[in-house]
């Protein structure tokens, strides 16, 4: 039921709303939710990473101008809808891409450009740390970037006073607090399953390993403090308010929830934080999260072990590449239509071509593609080259062409999921999807259901993703009843009235996807040749 504008205006003016901001890889989104945890206004800013000196990065200038642009768009939406100025809110939450490397000296000056999760140049460091700590340390983890810098004798290392993630950095500048939610923290360095803090034993092992480097710091001294959902993350400072809204209209000592990573906010946004549940976030990158009932039997380099915002162990399969190449091809078809004078809006273009894929052969008719715009750790690539290839007798038509790019977008993910579902026999009762791939109804959902041979559910909130998820964590920070768990809060206060749309796998398409994966694995040498020869 549509709410009365006057009632919502009153909520906004009283500060009875909750703000969530997430910095994703292609979009910075801000959402405002009401006391019923429903989105009442939003704003966004499009951006992209830069590849400079072989490093994927975003400049601090782009970070702050993008954040301010997104927040201004939210304020404008509030003004247009409710004829009032957004000057305060009940709580605020900051979320962003996990992992990566942001380091600062004792004067709070950035020491090297931000190295994002997309950088796969830490293979040696990742491998050594995984063996040393007996724990999977993926290439993109903060500690892998830190150790990479140490073993390569980078000049800045001895001057490090603080290391954090993008969400932690934004939160620090807005509140003055050097803290991080346990979900985001678990992508920096291993977490102790009992304390929900950084693992002290593994910190001691790391410090011992680097003692000959004569560093001026110990690891525990430069890491953020770890918090869990519901903890206080500090308050908006006067300086922070000016950073967020240079106009000065937004102010006040507004409380913050702990900053979180996009994986954690995705779990919250799909109500996937209980054991035997999971979710898939599919956009520029793709990752699947399954909340575990017990620890895995051994260490797998392909599987991350991270945590929910309330501190539950999660198996995470992450692939750096998902929809970038698929989007490029769809946009190329749009350009072709434009050249013939056929104007098609983006939604219709994507919807039509995606739906066409469902008409294709179950195994894509012999076609093959790799959407590797960057490296891919699951298949052991430090670099990537987008690639499409076919035999001369393949069934080359539009349906199979789009279908192969959809399959390929989750090809590496599928290899990681096979470890969990087939080798570890991980139990899974429900799986929910969210992110850009699910905006077109049915198609992405059905493709992933066939890939996992598991029903995939999508709620009508699927396109909102992490910005809504961190807004919900901000709401939980203030509105949770005494001793009410995050699980119960989401079940009772947020998701009780949302319906799910479920896509079921079909046997012939499951078999077709498996055949495609045989071709995908066999063709990795073609991708390797492309990387080696297309410099």
Image (cartoon, rainbow, N blue to C red):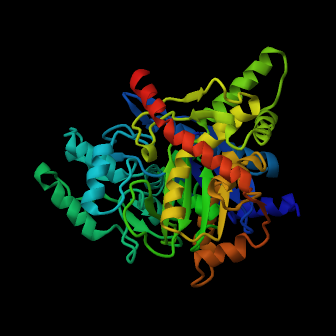
Task: Residue 93: name its quadrant.
Answer: bottom right
User: Does residue 471 appear to the left or right of 150 in the view shown?
Assistant: right
- Is residue 336 depicted above or below 202 in this figure? above
Observer-nearest of 334 and 160: 334
- State the residue at coordinates (55%, 65%): 290
Say which quarter of the image contains residue 399: top right
Task: Tell me: 12 left or right of 520.
Answer: right
The residue located at (53%, 57%) in the rendering is 418
Q: Nearer the viewer, residue 211 or 318?
A: 318
Single out the residue that lies furthest toward the front: 393
**Relative to 31, does residue 377 appear above or below in the rendering?**
above
Can see residue 28?
A: no
- Residue at x 37% of width, y 46% of height: 102
**Residue 56 versus residue 166 in the image, above or below:** above
Q: Is residue 207 visible?
A: yes
Could you say where residue 530 lies in the image, as x and y percent from the top left?
A: 46, 26
Q: Quadrant of residue 329?
A: top right
Quarter containing the N terminus:
bottom right
The x and y percentages for residue 347 are 79, 37
Relative to the observer, which residue lies in front, 399 or 252?
A: 399
Query: On the picture, is 203 further left or further right than 528?
Result: left
């Amino acid at each position: 039921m549509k709410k009365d504008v006057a009632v919502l205006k009153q909520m906004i003016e009283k500060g009875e709303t909750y703000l969530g901001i997430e910095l994703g890889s292609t979009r910075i989104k801000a959402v405002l939710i009401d006391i019923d945890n429903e989105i009442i206004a939003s704003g966004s800013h499009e951006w992209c990473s830069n590849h400079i000196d072989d490093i994927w990065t975003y400049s601090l200038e782009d970070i702050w101008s993008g954040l301010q642009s997104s927040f201004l768009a939210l304020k404008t939406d509030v003004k247009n809808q409710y004829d009032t100025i957004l000057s305060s809110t009940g709580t605020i939450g900051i979320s962003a891409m996990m992992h990566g490397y942001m380091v600062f000296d004792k004067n709070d000056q950035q020491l090297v450009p931000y190295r994002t999760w997309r950088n796969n140049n830490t293979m040696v460091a990742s491998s050594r740390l995984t063996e040393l700590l007996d724990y999977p340390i993926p290439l993109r983890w903060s500690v892998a970037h830190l150790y990479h810098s140490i073993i390569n004798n980078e000049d800045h290392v001895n001057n490090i006073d603080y290391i954090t993630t993008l969400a932690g950095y934004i939160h620090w500048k807005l509140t003055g607090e050097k803290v991080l939610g346990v979900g985001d923290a678990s992508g920096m360095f291993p977490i102790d399953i009992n304390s929900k803090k950084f693992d002290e034993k593994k910190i001691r092992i790391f410090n011992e390993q680097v003692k000959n480097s004569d560093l001026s710091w110990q690891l525990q001294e430069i890491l953020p403090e770890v918090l869990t959902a519901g903890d206080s993350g500090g308050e908006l400072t006067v300086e922070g308010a000016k950073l967020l809204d240079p106009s000065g209209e937004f102010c006040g000592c507004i409380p913050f929830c702990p900053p979180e990573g996009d994986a954690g906010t995705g779990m919250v946004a799909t109500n996937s934080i209980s054991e035997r549940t999971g979710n898939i976030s599919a956009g520029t990158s793709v990752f699947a999260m399954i909340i575990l009932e017990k620890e895995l039997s051994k260490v797998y380099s392909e599987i991350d072990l991270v945590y929910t915002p309330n501190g539950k162990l999660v198996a995470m399969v992450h692939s750096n590449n998902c929809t970038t190449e698929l989007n490029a091809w769809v946009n190329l078809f749009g350009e072709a239509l434009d050249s013939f004078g056929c104007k098609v809006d983006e939604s219709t273009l994507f919807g039509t071509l995606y739906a066409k894929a469902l008409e294709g052969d179950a195994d894509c008719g012999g076609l093959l593609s790799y959407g590797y715009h960057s490296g891919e750790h699951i298949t052991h690539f430090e670099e990537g080259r987008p690639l499409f290839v076919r035999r001369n007798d393949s069934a080359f038509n539009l349906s199979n062409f789009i279908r192969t790019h959809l399959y390929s977008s989750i090809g590496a993910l599928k290899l990681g999921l096979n470890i969990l579902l087939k080798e570890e026999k991980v139990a899974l009762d429900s799986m929910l999807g969210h992110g850009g791939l699910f905006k077109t109804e049915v198609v992405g959902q059905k493709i992933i259901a066939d890939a996992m041979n598991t029903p995939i559910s999508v709620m009508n909130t699927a396109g909102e993703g992490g910005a809504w998820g961190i807004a919900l964590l901000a709401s939980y920070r203030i509105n949770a009843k005494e001793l009410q768990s995050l699980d119960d809060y989401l079940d009772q206060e947020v998701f009780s009235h949302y319906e799910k749309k479920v896509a079921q796998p079909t046997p012939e398409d499951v078999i077709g996807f498996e055949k495609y994966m045989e071709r995908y694995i066999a063709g990795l040498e073609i991708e390797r040749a492309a990387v080696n020869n297309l410099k």
